[in-house]
Amino acid sequence: MFSNQKMPEAPLYMEGKWHGKDYSVIKELGRGANGVVYLVFHKGTKVALKVGLDSIDLLMEANVLTQLQSHNEKIGPAIYDVDDVVIEGKTHAYYAMEYVEGERLDRSLKQVGKEWLPLLLIQLLSHLHVIHQHGYVFGDLKPENMIVVKSGKQVCLIDFGGVSKQGHAVRQFTEEYDRALWQAGDRRADPGYDLFSLAVMMVRLCTDKETWNRLPSVRRHVQMLYAIIADNEHVAPYRIPLQKALEGRYQTAIQMKADILHAFHQKSVNVAGSSVASNKEGLGSKLLGGLFVVSMLLLAGSLYYLWM
Amino acid sequence: MAKPATLRQILVVTDGCSNSGISPIAAATLAREQGITVNVIGVIDKNELGEQGEQEIREMAQAGGGMHDIVYPAQLAQTVQMLTRKAMTRTIQHVVNKELKQILGESEMDNLSPEKRMQVAGMVDELGEQSSLEVVMLVDTSASMKNKIAAVQQAIFDFSISLRSRSGKSKMAVCSFPGKEKHLDTLIPWTNQVEKAYQLSSSLTMSGITPTGPAITEAIALFGHIELPEKLANKYQKNSRINEEDGGFMQDHVF
Ligand SMILES: Nc1ncnc2c1ncn2[C@@H]1O[C@H](COP(=O)(O)OP(=O)(O)OP(=O)(O)O)[C@@H](O)[C@H]1O
Ligand SMILES: [Mg+2]
């Protein structure tokens, strides 16, 4: 997006200026406002390496990742190395992190089906809770910034460029998920900011493109979301927690998580009861699917309490 | 370390080349000379911003020590906030760098280990959040902006939310160019609260004149810290003082 300081092409081989770790570049994974992320090899293992356009912003990200690392729940990629690299005579800061192999949340949902969404959301809420307890807010919450890990449907946050201290202004946001642009509050970082974005994201991921694109580009209002929620079978069961998040009525991610879990439970009970009339095959797979998800959830829940 | 004084920025929102008066690059140089950073956003509909327009935007930002970006109307609000923040960080980084040089002798930030720099980054970020910020938004209201004006209006309102979400003191003013009589009209004098119902469309002109350079030169005068030559001072500073006295609100712009 920024043409200001063009990021030079990475050389095939890089070596850190301070710690001397070496990396051979395999390919570019993506680029954005804060830098370029490469897939690289370090001692035979795949590593993701983010080279910054602006050293301050990149180092802030590294800061946060390092602080969250100590937590035993996996929230984002592990960080291995923070250093400088000289490319074409110019020094750039970079950090090396765990390569998270998987699909972006939106793409992943297309493959595994929308019934996974509440489960992933519940995981995200646990992640957010940890971030909030560290005194931060994630900020730029959107499907592009989360990866569903290939092995075992875990959702992992990437791109910590929006992470902001609570009480500060949110550093980075995306219009679509921004509380201020939905006229539902300001941009001061508080846990409610993330929960708002999460709710919009859930609605959006369950809405078809046409319906979503009918939303006006300016002067959006949460009432428009309530209308979408009301006639969408995927999100309607979660109307209460969604509405509470959109109205900023949650103080913590844990409260929202409890309500989503509750709604999920209600829903699976209803599905099991009401689908008796539908055809046999459909019922069987639906039930199995539902039961599987429920058991996963219970597992996730009990693990969570163990950690607390 | 001392808290940096007020950070001052001019943010130009335009969709094309200037075609009247002093070169905008010279004007941006002048602004920077007086401690004001110039950021520039090019707004495009389809592909209308030619090579020349792009170059001018880039050079203006470079000369003004600021950042630039070229975006679609839908990304405007997000871009305004991001450019402003990044430019602030950069200015503070320069200040911190200078101080470090003084404290550490030769070594400046690039010569600190990444671990030390991570600490400095935290400090720069904190300073950015706490410092005072004054931004003049300079909006191109020449005829070609017609289709984008709704997005610009939203971005203006939105920017005031961003400013109020900061911990440090902030204020903004909004000017349009070309003005009805001068190169520049002050639409919203210094304030930290733009009304939601604020309408920009009435400022649209039918003319194709885009006096970006003169507009920047005149916008410099809005910053109170600058000593102006007698004539200019009479012309601008009185006005802005009067407006500040009624709390930054200007009734006739609030519908
Ligand atoms: N640890 C990782 N493992 C795998 N892929 C990654 C990792 N980190 C980043 N990526 C990929 O690189 C892309 C860009 O990374 P990132 O979002 O951090 O960059 P950015 O410059 O902050 O972009 P943005 O404009 O979204 O802020 C991501 O969308 C993702 O596809
Ligand atoms: Mg990203």
Image (cartoon, coloured by chain):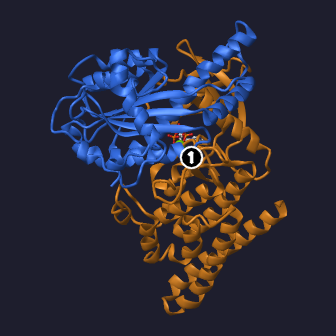
Chain colours: A orange, B blue
At x 48%, y 62%, the residue is A205
Quadrant, the C terminus of chain A: bottom right
Q: Chain of mark 1?
A: B
Task: Report x, y in % for residue B222.
Answer: 41, 28
At x 68%, y 63%, the residue is A251
* The residue positioned farthest toward the bottom in the image shown: A277
Classed neighbour count for the residue bearing mark 1: other residues with Cα under 10 Å, few (<14), some (14–19), many (≥20):
many
Task: Report x, y in % for residue A262.
Answer: 66, 77
- Residue A232 visible here: yes
Looking at the image, is B113 positioned above or below residue A222? Answer: above
Looking at the image, is A36 positioned above or below residue A237? Answer: above
Residue type pointed to by label 1: Ser
Asked whether mark 1 lies closer than 8 Å to ligand 1, one says no
Which one is nearer the viewer's eye here, B100 or B181? Answer: B181
Task: Report x, y in % for residue B176.
Answer: 30, 36
Q: Secondary structure at mark 1?
A: loop
At x 69%, y 11%, the residue is B101
Per the image, the residue denoted by label 1 is B165
